[in-house]
Amino acid sequence: MLNYLNQSMKNIIKNIEKVELFCNKILIFLASFFLICMMLLACVNVLFRNMGIPVKGTFELMGFFGAVICGLALARTQKQKQHISVDVLVNLFPKRIQKVLNFIGSFLSLLFFIIVTIQVFKWGTLILRANEVSETLMIVYYPFIYALSLGTLFISVTIFIDILKLGADV
């Protein structure tokens, strides 16, 4: 019975991971789109600046695009374990203690990113309700804040799946 439940849990985690992988691909596609826009904007601005006609609002858009790129890439980075990790001390412990320390670290990371998601979403809602616009281009920028919130939400989901996998030994 216990073996059946463990196998069921592993199947559920694998199905959740498939959905997560699909969502991560969409987020990376969007981040890539904004990165291309950012590069094109920088090139066009340099070209036109040399002709004496700089592109208005370049600094603003670069900031917005950069925030979106970083936010949307968080989950993929976590999934592929490409973030900075200091395992020198943890690797000295036995495997069982390493697993407990990984769980604690993942749980604290999950709590952190849940709080960040909530706060960034609240900030976006505040900007939306205030009808605030950017200083130079006068564009509404709450969608960029919500995109950042979406990125932190998905890293939370990714960390949660990592925690489930730690518990199920997948």
Image: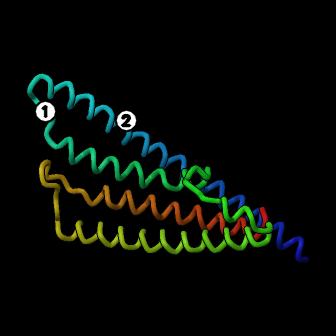
Characterize the local packing of mark 2: few (<14), some (14-19) or many (20 or more) Cα atoms within 10 angstroms.
Answer: few
How many labels sit on residues? 2
Residue drawn at point x = 26 percent, y = 34 percent? 41
Q: Nearer the viewer, mark 2 or mark 1?
A: 1
Q: Which residue corresponds to mark 2?
A: 36
Amino acid type of the residue tagged 1 in the rendering? Pro
Q: Position of residue 143 (x, y in %)?
A: 30, 57
Q: Residues within 10 Å of mark 1 (few under 14, many from 20)?
A: some
Relative to residue 143, is residue 28 drawn left or right? Answer: right
Residue in the picture at 27% in, 49% down: 63
Above or below: residue 63 compared with residue 130:
above
Q: Secondary structure at mark 2?
A: helix
Determine which residue is flagged by label 1: 54
The residue positioned 23% from the left and 66% from the top of the image is: 128
In the image, taking residue 167 as reference, residue 48 lies left or right, namely left
Q: Secondary structure at mark 1?
A: loop
Q: Position of residue 85 (x, y in %)?
A: 59, 57
